[in-house]
Each structure stands twice: as C-alpha cells, then as structure tokens.
Image (cartoon, rainbow, N blue to C red):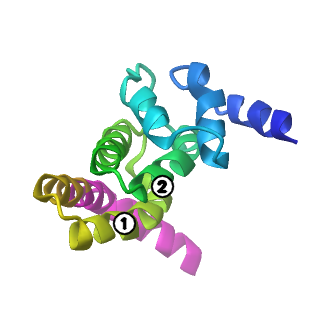
C-alpha cells in the first residue's frame, strides 16, 4: 500500500520535490525524524511554480513540524509554508491549506515561549492571510457562480 501512496505522490508533478518524496512520506507516517525532514525541505530551491499537488505533498510533514516541541523545527516549518505559498500559481490555491495552517500558527503565537518563534508565526500567518485577501475578486466570482 505504501508503494502505491509513494507512486501517487510522485505524480504531483513538482520536480523540485521529487528527490524528497520518500523522506516526506516517511515523515508523514512517523517513520522519519520530523526535524530532519524539515531541514531537507528548507534546503529545497523551488524552480517550478508551486501548485496545489505540491502543497498537498508537503502539508502532512509541515503540520507535523508545526506541532513539534522544537521551536527550531516549528520556525523552519512556518517559513517553508510561507515561502511555498508565495510561489503558488494562483492565490486561490492557498485557501485550503490556510485552514490547516492557521490553527497551528495561532497555537504557536499564543503558547510558544520563544518570542522570535511567536514573531515568525505571526508574520507567516499575516502573509498567508494577505495572500488569500488578494484573491477577493476570485472568491466573489466563485460565490456568484455557486449562487447561479
């Protein structure tokens, strides 16, 4: 079954993530060190635009890292999320992922003892919210289409 999941993840189409799929998968299922996976993702230079499948591939590892007890791991995961969301083709693509990231960022902002980590989480949350707000016309169009 895991081979099938790995094959499906490889169909995500982002060549920048391809060499790291196995590690992301291991991290997502708990078989790999979250901090190591996040360090690996932090070193990825994204040449391609980031699309929803690429975001979906890394989200399990990022959410795990944002839940980590390590401030360093949380900080790296937040910055990775921010950087990836800045590279999306369409700002509307970020919406579904903000719903997963926002509560985790809020928890860090409210509970982290490290002021630098709280500041980074706050900046990332603000950046993601601005990205979503920039798509206000797109949201209105979708709402209008749904109403018709």
Q: Which residue is mark 2?
A: 63
Q: Earlier in the sequence, mark 1 or mark 2?
A: 2
Image quadrant holding the C terminus, namely bottom right
Residue wearing tag 1: 102
Q: Residue furthest bottom?
A: 147
- The 10 Å Cα crowd at callout 1, few under 14, some 14 to 19, many 20 or more, is some
The x, y position of residue 18, in whole percent, is 60, 22
> Who's the residue at 63% across and 47% down the image?
30
Q: Is residue 26 left or right of residue 45?
A: right
Q: Quadrant of residue 111?
A: bottom left
What crowding class fits label 2: few (fewer than 14 Cα within 10 Å), some (14-19), or many (20 or more)? Answer: some
Most extreme residue toward the right is 1
Give the secondary structure at mark 1: helix
Residue 72 magenta-drawn?
Answer: no
Question: Which portion, as a residue range, is magenta?
Answer: 125-148
Residue at image position (51%, 43%) is 55
Closer to the camera in the image, 12 or 68:
68
Residue at figure coordinates x 65%, y 38% from the top left = 25
Which quarter of the picture shows residue 45?
top left
State whether residue 121 is above or below residue 73.
below
Residue visible at 44% across and 31% down in the picture: 41
How far across and down, in percent of the image, does residue 130 sit?
23, 58
Left or right placement of residue 39 versus residue 121 in this view = right
x, y percentage for residue 74?
A: 33, 50
């Amino acid at each position: 079954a895991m081979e099938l999941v790995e094959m499906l993840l490889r169909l995500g189409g982002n060549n920048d993530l391809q060499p790291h799929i196995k590690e992301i998968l291991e991290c997502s299922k708990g078989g790999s060190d979250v901090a190591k996976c996040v360090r690996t993702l932090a070193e990825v230079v994204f040449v391609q635009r980031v699309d929803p499948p690429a975001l979906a591939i890394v989200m399990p590892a990022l959410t795990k890292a944002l839940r980590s007890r390590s401030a360093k791991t949380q900080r790296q995961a937040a910055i990775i999320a921010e950087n990836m969301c800045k590279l999306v083709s369409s700002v509307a693509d970020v919406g579904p992922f903000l719903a997963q990231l926002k509560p985790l960022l809020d928890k860090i902002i409210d509970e982290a003892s490290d002021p630098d980590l709280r500041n980074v989480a706050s900046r990332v949350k603000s950046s993601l919210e601005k990205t979503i707000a920039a798509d206000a016309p797109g949201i209105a169009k979708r709402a209008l289409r749904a109403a018709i």
